Amino acid sequence: MTKGVEDRFVTTDLNTLVTALYVKIDDWLGAPGTPARIGRPPKLTDAELLTLAIAQALLGIRSETRWLRFLPVHLPGAFPYLPGQSGYNKRLRASLPLIQRAIRALARDTDLWTDPVWVVDSTPVECGSRPTVQRSELAGWAGYGYCRSHSRFFWGLRLHLVCTPAGLPITWALATPKLDERQVLMAVLDHDPHLLIERPGLLIIADKGYVSAGLDAYLAERGVHLLRPSYRNRAPRPGEQFLKPIRQLIESVNDTLKGQLDLELHGGRSPLGVAVRIAQRILALTAAVWHNRATGQPITRSLIAYDH
Protein backbone atom coordinates (compact mmCIF):
# COMPACT_ATOMS: atom_id res chain seq x y z
CA MET A 1 0.00 0.00 0.00
CA THR A 2 1.32 3.42 -0.91
CA LYS A 3 2.31 5.66 2.01
CA GLY A 4 1.35 9.29 2.26
CA VAL A 5 -0.96 11.08 4.67
CA GLU A 6 -0.97 14.55 6.16
CA ASP A 7 -0.23 14.98 9.84
CA ARG A 8 -3.65 16.53 10.40
CA PHE A 9 -6.66 14.53 9.27
CA VAL A 10 -9.50 16.65 7.91
CA THR A 11 -12.05 14.12 6.68
CA THR A 12 -13.63 10.96 8.01
CA ASP A 13 -14.28 8.37 5.34
CA LEU A 14 -13.04 4.86 4.68
CA ASN A 15 -10.24 5.90 2.30
CA THR A 16 -8.85 8.40 4.81
CA LEU A 17 -9.08 5.89 7.64
CA VAL A 18 -7.39 3.15 5.59
CA THR A 19 -4.51 5.44 4.61
CA ALA A 20 -4.02 6.80 8.14
CA LEU A 21 -4.18 3.31 9.60
CA TYR A 22 -1.65 1.89 7.18
CA VAL A 23 0.84 4.65 7.97
CA LYS A 24 0.31 4.31 11.72
CA ILE A 25 0.60 0.50 11.72
CA ASP A 26 3.59 0.49 9.37
CA ASP A 27 5.42 3.00 11.58
CA TRP A 28 4.50 0.98 14.68
CA LEU A 29 5.79 -2.28 13.18
CA GLY A 30 9.04 -0.58 12.22
CA ALA A 31 9.60 1.01 15.61
CA PRO A 32 12.50 -0.15 17.83
CA GLY A 33 11.49 -2.94 20.19
CA THR A 34 8.76 -4.34 17.94
CA PRO A 35 9.30 -8.09 17.30
CA ALA A 36 10.80 -8.56 13.82
CA ARG A 37 9.27 -10.96 11.33
CA ILE A 38 11.38 -14.07 10.73
CA GLY A 39 11.91 -15.35 7.21
CA ARG A 40 11.39 -13.91 3.76
CA PRO A 41 9.12 -10.83 3.66
CA PRO A 42 5.65 -11.71 2.33
CA LYS A 43 4.20 -9.98 -0.73
CA LEU A 44 1.35 -8.69 1.47
CA THR A 45 2.99 -6.91 4.40
CA ASP A 46 1.74 -7.19 7.97
CA ALA A 47 0.65 -3.55 7.87
CA GLU A 48 -1.38 -4.20 4.72
CA LEU A 49 -2.88 -7.36 6.23
CA LEU A 50 -4.08 -5.53 9.35
CA THR A 51 -5.45 -2.66 7.27
CA LEU A 52 -7.34 -5.15 5.07
CA ALA A 53 -8.77 -6.90 8.14
CA ILE A 54 -10.00 -3.62 9.65
CA ALA A 55 -11.60 -2.40 6.42
CA GLN A 56 -13.33 -5.76 5.90
CA ALA A 57 -14.88 -5.65 9.37
CA LEU A 58 -15.98 -2.01 9.02
CA LEU A 59 -17.69 -2.72 5.70
CA GLY A 60 -19.40 -5.81 7.11
CA ILE A 61 -18.19 -8.17 4.36
CA ARG A 62 -18.01 -11.51 6.13
CA SER A 63 -17.06 -13.62 3.09
CA GLU A 64 -13.31 -13.49 2.46
CA THR A 65 -13.82 -14.49 -1.18
CA ARG A 66 -16.29 -11.66 -1.72
CA TRP A 67 -13.98 -9.24 0.09
CA LEU A 68 -11.06 -10.01 -2.22
CA ARG A 69 -13.33 -9.48 -5.25
CA PHE A 70 -14.62 -6.22 -3.76
CA LEU A 71 -11.20 -4.58 -3.25
CA PRO A 72 -9.95 -4.09 -6.84
CA VAL A 73 -13.25 -2.44 -7.80
CA HIS A 74 -13.82 -0.16 -4.80
CA LEU A 75 -10.24 0.47 -3.60
CA PRO A 76 -8.26 0.23 -6.85
CA GLY A 77 -4.52 0.50 -6.46
CA ALA A 78 -4.62 0.64 -2.66
CA PHE A 79 -3.05 -2.79 -2.30
CA PRO A 80 -0.50 -3.70 -5.00
CA TYR A 81 -0.78 -7.41 -4.16
CA LEU A 82 -3.80 -9.39 -3.00
CA PRO A 83 -3.54 -13.09 -2.08
CA GLY A 84 -6.15 -15.68 -2.92
CA GLN A 85 -8.85 -16.60 -0.45
CA SER A 86 -6.85 -19.50 1.00
CA GLY A 87 -3.71 -17.40 1.45
CA TYR A 88 -5.63 -14.53 3.06
CA ASN A 89 -7.40 -16.99 5.35
CA LYS A 90 -4.14 -18.55 6.52
CA ARG A 91 -2.39 -15.21 7.02
CA LEU A 92 -5.31 -13.80 8.98
CA ARG A 93 -5.52 -16.76 11.33
CA ALA A 94 -1.78 -16.79 11.91
CA SER A 95 -1.91 -13.08 12.77
CA LEU A 96 -3.95 -13.35 16.00
CA PRO A 97 -1.02 -12.30 18.25
CA LEU A 98 -0.27 -9.43 15.85
CA ILE A 99 -3.91 -8.28 15.92
CA GLN A 100 -3.90 -8.36 19.72
CA ARG A 101 -0.76 -6.20 19.83
CA ALA A 102 -2.23 -3.82 17.24
CA ILE A 103 -5.37 -3.32 19.35
CA ARG A 104 -3.19 -2.30 22.28
CA ALA A 105 -0.94 -0.06 20.15
CA LEU A 106 -3.87 1.89 18.68
CA ALA A 107 -5.60 2.15 22.05
CA ARG A 108 -2.46 3.51 23.70
CA ASP A 109 -2.19 6.14 20.97
CA THR A 110 -5.30 7.94 22.25
CA ASP A 111 -5.82 10.13 25.30
CA LEU A 112 -8.67 7.77 26.28
CA TRP A 113 -6.15 5.09 27.26
CA THR A 114 -5.45 6.79 30.60
CA ASP A 115 -9.13 7.22 31.52
CA PRO A 116 -9.44 6.46 35.27
CA VAL A 117 -12.85 4.80 34.77
CA TRP A 118 -13.52 1.40 33.17
CA VAL A 119 -16.78 -0.32 32.32
CA VAL A 120 -16.87 -4.13 32.29
CA ASP A 121 -19.46 -6.63 31.06
CA SER A 122 -19.80 -9.86 29.10
CA THR A 123 -22.01 -10.66 26.13
CA PRO A 124 -22.94 -13.93 24.37
CA VAL A 125 -21.18 -14.93 21.16
CA GLU A 126 -23.20 -17.73 19.60
CA CYS A 127 -21.21 -20.35 17.70
CA GLY A 128 -23.83 -22.76 16.40
CA SER A 129 -27.27 -24.25 16.69
CA ARG A 130 -28.17 -27.39 18.63
CA PRO A 131 -27.49 -29.86 15.74
CA THR A 132 -23.92 -28.55 15.34
CA VAL A 133 -22.92 -28.90 18.98
CA GLN A 134 -21.63 -32.47 18.90
CA ARG A 135 -19.67 -32.23 15.64
CA SER A 136 -18.23 -28.75 16.12
CA GLU A 137 -14.47 -28.28 16.67
CA LEU A 138 -15.48 -25.79 19.35
CA ALA A 139 -16.90 -28.53 21.58
CA GLY A 140 -15.03 -28.43 24.88
CA TRP A 141 -14.45 -24.67 24.69
CA ALA A 142 -17.88 -23.39 23.72
CA GLY A 143 -20.82 -24.43 25.87
CA TYR A 144 -24.38 -23.66 26.90
CA GLY A 145 -25.07 -20.37 28.63
CA TYR A 146 -27.96 -18.11 29.50
CA CYS A 147 -28.47 -14.63 28.07
CA ARG A 148 -30.31 -12.53 30.66
CA SER A 149 -31.05 -9.64 28.31
CA HIS A 150 -32.89 -11.93 25.86
CA SER A 151 -34.08 -14.50 28.42
CA ARG A 152 -32.84 -17.46 26.41
CA PHE A 153 -30.15 -20.13 26.34
CA PHE A 154 -27.42 -20.20 23.70
CA TRP A 155 -24.49 -22.39 22.68
CA GLY A 156 -21.20 -20.60 22.22
CA LEU A 157 -18.87 -18.34 24.19
CA ARG A 158 -18.98 -15.12 26.15
CA LEU A 159 -16.95 -12.07 25.21
CA HIS A 160 -15.69 -10.36 28.36
CA LEU A 161 -14.90 -6.77 27.45
CA VAL A 162 -13.28 -4.01 29.49
CA CYS A 163 -13.49 -0.56 27.92
CA THR A 164 -13.56 3.13 28.78
CA PRO A 165 -16.89 5.00 28.99
CA ALA A 166 -16.14 6.38 25.49
CA GLY A 167 -16.00 2.82 24.13
CA LEU A 168 -12.25 2.31 23.72
CA PRO A 169 -11.41 -1.38 24.30
CA ILE A 170 -8.82 -1.85 27.05
CA THR A 171 -8.70 -5.65 27.27
CA TRP A 172 -10.92 -8.61 26.46
CA ALA A 173 -11.24 -12.37 26.68
CA LEU A 174 -13.32 -15.17 25.18
CA ALA A 175 -14.43 -17.87 27.61
CA THR A 176 -16.93 -20.66 27.97
CA PRO A 177 -20.23 -19.29 29.35
CA LYS A 178 -19.99 -21.70 32.27
CA LEU A 179 -17.15 -19.67 33.79
CA ASP A 180 -18.07 -17.06 36.39
CA GLU A 181 -17.75 -13.47 35.14
CA ARG A 182 -15.91 -12.47 38.32
CA GLN A 183 -13.33 -15.22 37.91
CA VAL A 184 -12.74 -14.26 34.28
CA LEU A 185 -12.22 -10.60 35.20
CA MET A 186 -9.62 -11.52 37.82
CA ALA A 187 -7.87 -13.86 35.37
CA VAL A 188 -7.76 -11.14 32.71
CA LEU A 189 -6.25 -8.62 35.15
CA ASP A 190 -3.74 -11.19 36.45
CA HIS A 191 -2.69 -11.88 32.85
CA ASP A 192 -1.89 -8.19 32.30
CA PRO A 193 -1.08 -6.68 35.72
CA HIS A 194 0.46 -3.52 34.23
CA LEU A 195 -3.04 -2.32 33.32
CA LEU A 196 -3.78 -1.68 37.00
CA ILE A 197 -0.28 -0.51 37.91
CA GLU A 198 -0.56 2.26 35.30
CA ARG A 199 -3.84 3.54 36.78
CA PRO A 200 -3.74 4.22 40.54
CA GLY A 201 -7.18 4.93 41.94
CA LEU A 202 -8.98 3.19 39.04
CA LEU A 203 -12.79 2.91 39.21
CA ILE A 204 -14.47 -0.11 37.56
CA ILE A 205 -18.22 0.03 36.91
CA ALA A 206 -20.09 -3.26 36.51
CA ASP A 207 -23.54 -4.82 36.90
CA LYS A 208 -24.95 -7.13 39.60
CA GLY A 209 -23.21 -10.15 38.08
CA TYR A 210 -19.95 -8.91 39.59
CA VAL A 211 -21.18 -8.87 43.19
CA SER A 212 -18.55 -10.78 45.16
CA ALA A 213 -16.68 -10.21 48.40
CA GLY A 214 -13.74 -12.08 46.86
CA LEU A 215 -13.64 -9.77 43.83
CA ASP A 216 -13.97 -6.70 46.06
CA ALA A 217 -11.01 -7.85 48.15
CA TYR A 218 -8.95 -8.72 45.03
CA LEU A 219 -9.47 -5.25 43.55
CA ALA A 220 -9.01 -3.44 46.88
CA GLU A 221 -5.57 -5.07 47.28
CA ARG A 222 -4.63 -3.48 43.96
CA GLY A 223 -6.04 -0.04 44.77
CA VAL A 224 -9.10 -0.43 42.51
CA HIS A 225 -12.65 0.51 43.49
CA LEU A 226 -15.58 -1.47 42.06
CA LEU A 227 -18.94 0.28 41.74
CA ARG A 228 -22.00 -1.89 40.99
CA PRO A 229 -25.67 -2.03 41.93
CA SER A 230 -26.68 -3.71 45.16
CA TYR A 231 -29.33 -6.38 45.40
CA ARG A 232 -32.79 -5.20 46.43
CA ASN A 233 -32.47 -6.65 49.91
CA ARG A 234 -29.27 -4.72 50.60
CA ALA A 235 -28.65 -1.08 51.38
CA PRO A 236 -27.58 0.98 48.34
CA ARG A 237 -23.89 1.78 48.10
CA PRO A 238 -22.66 5.38 47.74
CA GLY A 239 -22.79 6.58 44.12
CA GLU A 240 -25.29 3.97 42.89
CA GLN A 241 -27.72 6.66 41.75
CA PHE A 242 -25.27 7.58 38.96
CA LEU A 243 -24.71 4.02 37.75
CA LYS A 244 -27.51 3.38 35.27
CA PRO A 245 -26.48 5.77 32.45
CA ILE A 246 -22.83 4.71 32.76
CA ARG A 247 -23.65 1.00 32.72
CA GLN A 248 -25.70 1.53 29.58
CA LEU A 249 -22.49 2.59 27.82
CA ILE A 250 -21.10 -0.96 27.82
CA GLU A 251 -24.42 -2.19 26.41
CA SER A 252 -24.03 0.39 23.67
CA VAL A 253 -20.50 -0.84 22.89
CA ASN A 254 -21.77 -4.44 22.69
CA ASP A 255 -24.55 -3.24 20.40
CA THR A 256 -21.96 -1.62 18.12
CA LEU A 257 -20.00 -4.87 17.96
CA LYS A 258 -23.11 -6.91 17.23
CA GLY A 259 -25.22 -4.53 15.17
CA GLN A 260 -22.54 -2.86 13.04
CA LEU A 261 -19.59 -5.25 13.16
CA ASP A 262 -21.58 -8.52 13.02
CA LEU A 263 -19.99 -10.01 16.14
CA GLU A 264 -22.48 -12.88 16.27
CA LEU A 265 -22.13 -13.60 12.54
CA HIS A 266 -18.41 -14.29 12.77
CA GLY A 267 -18.63 -17.61 10.93
CA GLY A 268 -15.72 -19.17 12.82
CA ARG A 269 -15.69 -22.96 13.01
CA SER A 270 -12.55 -23.58 15.04
CA PRO A 271 -11.16 -21.99 18.22
CA LEU A 272 -8.53 -20.06 16.23
CA GLY A 273 -11.07 -19.08 13.58
CA VAL A 274 -13.50 -17.69 16.15
CA ALA A 275 -10.79 -15.93 18.16
CA VAL A 276 -9.26 -14.14 15.17
CA ARG A 277 -12.64 -13.01 13.81
CA ILE A 278 -13.64 -11.59 17.18
CA ALA A 279 -10.23 -9.90 17.49
CA GLN A 280 -10.66 -8.50 13.97
CA ARG A 281 -13.89 -6.78 15.01
CA ILE A 282 -12.42 -5.40 18.23
CA LEU A 283 -9.47 -4.08 16.21
CA ALA A 284 -11.90 -2.38 13.80
CA LEU A 285 -13.75 -0.74 16.69
CA THR A 286 -10.46 0.41 18.24
CA ALA A 287 -9.29 1.81 14.90
CA ALA A 288 -12.51 3.79 14.43
CA VAL A 289 -12.26 5.23 17.97
CA TRP A 290 -8.59 6.07 17.36
CA HIS A 291 -9.32 7.88 14.09
CA ASN A 292 -12.42 9.67 15.40
CA ARG A 293 -10.44 10.92 18.37
CA ALA A 294 -7.60 12.10 16.12
CA THR A 295 -9.99 13.99 13.85
CA GLY A 296 -12.01 15.52 16.71
CA GLN A 297 -15.31 13.85 15.87
CA PRO A 298 -18.17 14.55 18.32
CA ILE A 299 -19.15 10.86 18.64
CA THR A 300 -16.02 8.88 19.40
CA ARG A 301 -17.44 5.42 18.69
CA SER A 302 -19.36 6.22 15.49
CA LEU A 303 -18.69 3.89 12.52
CA ILE A 304 -21.14 5.49 10.09
CA ALA A 305 -18.46 7.31 8.09
CA TYR A 306 -16.60 4.04 7.43
CA ASP A 307 -19.30 1.45 6.69
CA HIS A 308 -19.88 2.30 3.02
Image (cartoon, rainbow, N blue to C red):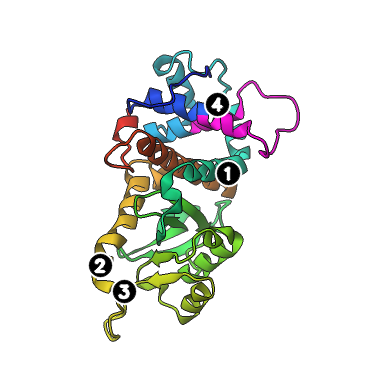
Q: Is residue 127 visible?
A: no
Residue under numbered circle 2? 242
Image side of residue 194 versus residue 301, left or right: right
Quadrant of the image containing the C terminus = top left
Image side of residue 50 versus residue 36, left or right: left
Of labels 4 and 2, earlier in sequence is 4
Residue under numbered circle 4? 48
Hey, what amino acid is under mark 4?
Answer: Glu
Residue under numbered circle 3? 229
- Which residues fall within the magenta stretch? 24-53
Image side of residue 276 versus residue 236, left or right: right
Whether residues under marks 1 and 2 lie with C-beta atoms below 8 angstroms apart, the answer is: no
Crowding near pointer 2: few (<14 within 10 Å), some, many (20+)? few
Residue under numbered circle 1? 101
Q: Residue at x 49, y 55 (%)?
A: 172
Horizontal and vertical percent position of residue 37 = 70, 33
* Mark 1 → mark 2, Cα distance in angstroms: 34 Å
Crowding near pointer 3: few (<14 within 10 Å), some, many (20+)? many
Marker disc for residue 9: none
Q: Residue at x 28, y 81 (%)?
A: 236
* Residue situated furthest right in the rendering: 39
